[in-house]
Image (spheres, coloured by chain):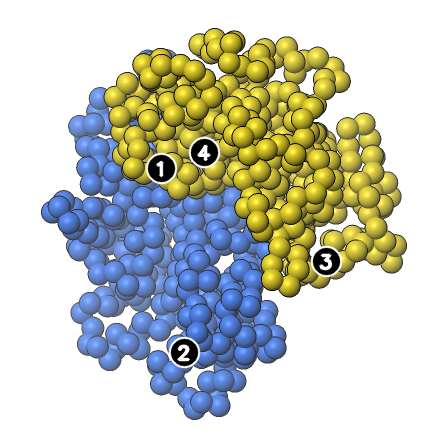
Chain colours: A blue, B yellow
Amino acid sequence: MSVQQIAAQVTASAAPLVSVEDLRIHFATRDRQTVKAVDGVSFAILPGETFGIIGESGSGKTTLGRALVGLVPPTAGRIRYGGEDLRSLPRRRLRQLRRDYQIIFQDPHAALNPRMTILQSVQEPLEIMREGTPASRRRAALEALERAGLGPQLAERYPHQLSGGQKQRVNIARVLTLRPKFIVCDEVVAALDVSIRGAILNLFAELQQEFGITYAFITHDISVVSHISDRVAVMYLGQLMELGPTAAVTSRPLHPYTAALLSAEPQPLPSDMRTEKRRIQLAGEIPSPLAPPSGCRFRTRCPAARPQCAEQAPAWRELTPGHWVACHFATPAGAVLETDHAMTTTANAEERT
Amino acid sequence: MQRLELGETRSHPPAQAGAERAAPAAQPLLTVRDLSIAFRHRDGEVAITRDVSFDILPGERVGLVGESGCGKTVTGLSLLRLLPKRSVRLRGQLLFDGQDLIRLSPRQLRAVRGRDISMIFQEPMTALDPVFTIGEQLSETLRAHFDISRKEARERAVEALAEVGIPAPGRRYHDYPHQFSGGMRQRVMIAMALICRPRLVIADEPTTALDVTVQAQIIDLLCRLSEETGTALLFITHDLGVVAETCSRMLTMYAGEVVEDAPTDAVLRKPKHPYTSDLLRSLPSLSPRGAPLPSIPGRVPAPDQMPSGCRFYDRCAYAMAACKGAQPMQAVAPGRLVRCWRAHQLDLPGAVN
């Protein structure tokens, strides 16, 4: 994707907070193969928005999230923060800039040091930044805990004495102390029970309103991502399949993969209210990123795959304003879900796996 | 589908698909009566579940839902007596086909496990033995229960693999668990659970570790096989969407008790217990986008601090003084039981409003 296209994508609105340009992240395996975890991804995140990234395991969404906060260096392409490329910065400036870009992980327990009290954990980022005095750091930490919905009585406890929801609140408080502009939330509610998920998602929304934080919200859960995101990017095998405003992507998906994801989500509704069109059954599972399919990466599972899909990678194109897709056959009316000889592809789905 | 013809060694004829289920007021296949599970420790006992009672009819699919720690997994494990005998005390009755599983000798239990009742676990990788091929593990199950030759067992194992949609089953028979993907491993687990044509399968979060598109495949497979073979299914899950799509009845557990037992469609439309209602309302897919999500305040009481009355009292928006009294299960409609004395007075929101 060219710079002009990125500019078009953010259509005349504010300058992007984070812009990702043809990002590639490759890992070498022990037997000298290459895992292309992220393979040519371009998008821009606008200030104040919640940018959802959805994908199945192995889609590269976590690697992308880590790259967004500089935890994984890009193999090629670049990520710019407010126009600056982190890799071209001197060390001191990098340190300064980096505090604005934070990440919260999936497992709230693993993210906390079991031998540190909650207060120590929450203060630690400030200590690392050498900000303020011990007293002011303590005060800031208690304030952040309070803001995350945890009283001071929990400050002297250890992680194992807290519930999962409380621990995730600690992790939120911990990044809040640095007053970041941007937070990558990597499956932050996946480990939590449904009954407390709502409270944590609400907290994220409140903090966004209060501090104007921008989020990249990475999840496999369509119901979560569609609830909180302004825009959604759909990832598959290291590439973006679709990107657009949440309402458009969820109500009128342009890519067959997005349509399949949406229809696979089990609906908690009585049988007579569930949509009958139910389930575009996808054959098989996500192929190995060591040997991704030629052409379109999704073609091996796509109900609408045609010979062209194996030969040619689909272009990343903007079908309707702000709504991008990588599929040869998508039209503004929606995703193409059948081939001309649809029976052979869907009926033989089981055998093809 | 091939039916096992092992009449000689089989103590019960295979359930006729559909026939038994269709019969009105069929005898329950499994009756759980006042099952209380307690874990012993140095200073005494911790009660994990209290007076759990429910029935499963032949061929019926029942969902057991609840959040982590509510006792749904231990209840499932107790049905196969898989809990460690030294540290666990079971009280109550587990009547399977008239015999009380709690009173069976280890030898009698071995005859039931895998034969009449089998289990599918959440993590197929830890449930399968890594040092044996899946073919060996499948035929072992058969040969443990039936007096058949290796060759015959092998043939049936290959058939079973084909039945669950594993491509090239004859070749995959010789593969080890690590050579399968997550979804394929779960298919192997299902093949293993069903190979002796049991009358009850306990599936403990069988799709939680899988991606949503693969989950859709596995759910459909389980439903199809249960219908074809007349096998009853106890589906343990935290995902209300999965229950809605697979089960005709739903048991809701909270803090070690069943609080609601009702037909799935009825409970989704009009839950009668405030906890079930709150659980449904906290699903993001049922809230308007961007609106604050309902969540349940507080947390589950610790097992050693369970109130004698309603266990949901502290978190319930409808609690009254009388809720502190004992709450027996009471019938509110035909086939509907609720552990809430206010059930008749309350009009609670469900998944449909």
Which mark, by number, is residue B129? 1
Q: Are marks 3 and 2 in contact (CB under 8 Å)?
A: no
Which mark, by number, is residue A124? 2
Q: Quadrant of the C terminus of chain B?
A: top right
A341 vs A218: above or below: above
B267 vs A13: above or below: above
Q: Are marks 3 and 4 in contact (CB under 8 Å)?
A: no
Q: Amino acid at mark 2?
A: Glu
Q: How many marks?
A: 4
Task: State left or right for residue B275 relative to residue A173.
Answer: right
For marks 4 and 1, give the CA distance.
23 Å
Of marks 3 and 2, the one in the foreground? 3
Q: Are marks 1 and 2 in contact (CB under 8 Å)?
A: no
Mark 2 nearby-residue class (10 Å; few <14, some 14–19, many ≥20): some
- Mark 3 = which residue? B306
Task: State left or right for residue A312 relative to residue B205.
Answer: left
Q: Chain of mark 3?
A: B
Residue A286, quarter of the rendered image: top left
For marks 3 and 4, give the CA distance.
35 Å
